[in-house]
Image (cartoon, rainbow, N blue to C red):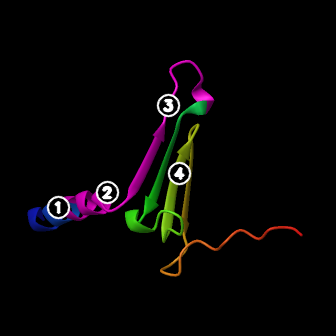
Amino acid sequence: MWWALKWFFISWALLLMLSDIQISTSLYQYQQNRVLINIPRWQANRPWATLQWHVGRIEAHWYGLAGKPAAILDQ
């Protein structure tokens, strides 16, 4: 049991070190509080996965190793 728990925390710490974390906070306006995590850190513009917390709402997206699809622009 302790072996699995130890490796869980080591894996979690490694994942956080390899991710790009952006935190936006405001003391006066609750709506401006936000946490955005992109995994991996070295591909912040085309992440494999994103996790976002904004005003009590949690959104998680898994894009796979190909990365986040590019935005389609209207012509």
Q: Nearer the viewer, mark 1 or mark 3?
A: 3
Q: In which quadrant of the rendered image does the C terminus lie?
A: bottom right
Percent across and percent down for residue 67 are: 53, 75
Whole-Å distance between the Cαs marked 1 and 3?
32 Å
In the displayed orientation, state which residue is furthest to the left. 2
Label 1 belongs to which residue? 5
The residue pinned by badge 2 equals: 16
Which residue in the structure is indicated by mark 4? 52
Q: Residue drawn at (53%, 81%), measured in percent from left and top?
A: 66
Q: Mark 4 and mark 3: span between their CA atoms?
A: 14 Å
Q: Disc 3 designates what residue?
A: 25
Residue 53: x and y, percent?
53, 46
C-alpha gap between disc 4 and disc 2: 14 Å
Point out the frontmost of discs 4 and 3: 3
Q: Nearer the viewer, mark 4 or mark 1?
A: 4
Point 18% across, 61% down: residue = 10
Query: Which secondary structure, mark 1?
Result: helix
Earlier-in-chain disc, 1 versus 3: 1
> Callout 2: few (<14), some (14-19), or many (20+) C-alpha neighbours within 10 Å?
some
> Which one is in front, 11 or 68?
68
User: Three-letter amino acid code at disc 4?
Assistant: Gln
Q: Residues within 10 Å of mark 1 (few under 14, many from 20)?
A: few
Q: Is residue 42 placed above or below 30 in the rendered structure?
A: below
Secondary-structure class at tag 4: strand
Which amino acid type is shown beneath numbered disc 3? Answer: Thr
Disc 2 vs disc 1: which is toward the camera? 2
